């Protein structure tokens, strides 16, 4: 019995050390990127984190697909940066981040004087057909979420909620073989449609 325990312990210890070593040389891990609207309506914070130091380019693009601002970071593995939209006209913008291994983008809606919840939809790469919808921002707001089969425009799911705090919810639409669209309707009537 003692011999069996010792062998099991050695195998378990070897496995733990092997997996605790982290990723093998040459494998790249994905960087994390998020945009959160601040308590002031015109302020958006960009959060970036990576396992490796790399050059990063951040761009802000308006709804006409014109770059209105850009900034380059040299050899960074993360940052938190506020961006003030006060001098920009209200509308839809895309904050785009390029780090040499990937390009990521978040769409935001800037509206003067009205603070809306910031809603982000992320496709979970490791789980096919699973999406994370996160809601952040001050105050409370009634939000309607509709999920469509993009090809047929068939409504798959609809819900309306009064959102008081930051929250997130996981949706499984793995039965849809083609693209799906998330339609978010804010209390102000502002509509976002994101297709994956």
Image (cartoon, rainbow, N blue to C red):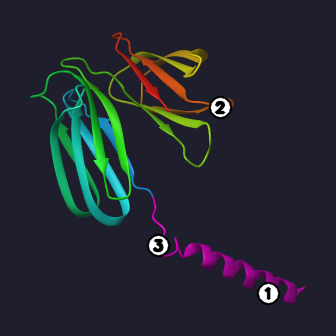
Q: Which residue is mark 3?
A: 26
Of circles 1 and 3, the one toward us is 3
Q: Distance from label 1 to label 2 (Cα)?
A: 50 Å
Q: Which quadrant of the figure contains the N terminus?
A: bottom right
Q: Residue furthest left?
A: 87
Magenta residues span 1-29
Q: Quadrant of residue 128?
A: top right
**Dot 1: few (<14), some (14–19), or many (≥20) neighbours within 10 Å?**
few
Along the line of sight, which residue is nearer the eye, 145 or 60?
A: 60
Residue 160 position in % (x across, y down): 51, 14
- Between label 1 and label 2, give the one nearer the viewer: 2
**Compared with residue 30, is residue 152 higher up or lower down, i.e. above or below?**
above
Which disc number belongs to residue 177? Answer: 2
Residue 181 lies, with reference to residue 78, above or below; the image says above
Mark 3 to mark 2 CA distance (whole Å): 33 Å
Q: Secondary structure at mark 3?
A: loop
Residue at x 68%, y 80% (from the top left corner): 13
Around disc 3, counting alpha carbons within 10 Å, would you say few (fewer than 14), some (14 to 19), or many (20 or more)?
A: few
Main secondary structure of the magenta stretch: helix
Residue 164 percent across, percent down from the top left: 42, 23
The reply to whether callout 1 and callout 2 are in contact (CB within 8 Å) is no
**Magenta stretch: residue 18 in it?**
yes
Label 1 belongs to which residue?
A: 6
Would you say 95 lies left or right of 135 here?
Answer: left
């Amino acid at each position: 019995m003692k011999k069996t325990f010792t062998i099991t312990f050695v195998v378990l210890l070897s496995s733990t050390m092997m997996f605790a070593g982290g990723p093998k040389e040459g494998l790249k891990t994905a960087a994390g990127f998020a945009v959160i609207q601040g308590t002031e309506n015109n302020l958006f914070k960009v959060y970036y984190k990576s396992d490796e130091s790399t050059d990063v380019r951040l761009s802000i693009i308006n709804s006409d697909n014109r770059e209105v601002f850009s900034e380059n970071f040299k050899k960074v593995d993360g940052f938190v940066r506020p961006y003030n939209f006060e001098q920009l006209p209200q509308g839809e913008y895309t904050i785009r981040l390029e780090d040499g291994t990937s390009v990521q983008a978040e769409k935001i809606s800037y509206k003067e004087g009205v603070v809306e919840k910031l809603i982000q939809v992320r496709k979970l790469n490791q789980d096919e057909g699973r999406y994370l919808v996160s809601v952040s921002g001050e105050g409370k707001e009634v939000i309607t979420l509709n999920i469509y089969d993009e090809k047929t425009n068939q409504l798959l799911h609809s819900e309306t909620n009064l959102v008081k705090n930051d929250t997130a919810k996981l949706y499984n639409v793995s039965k849809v073989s083609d693209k799906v669209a998330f339609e978010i309707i804010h209390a102000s009537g502002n509509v976002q449609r994101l297709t994956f």
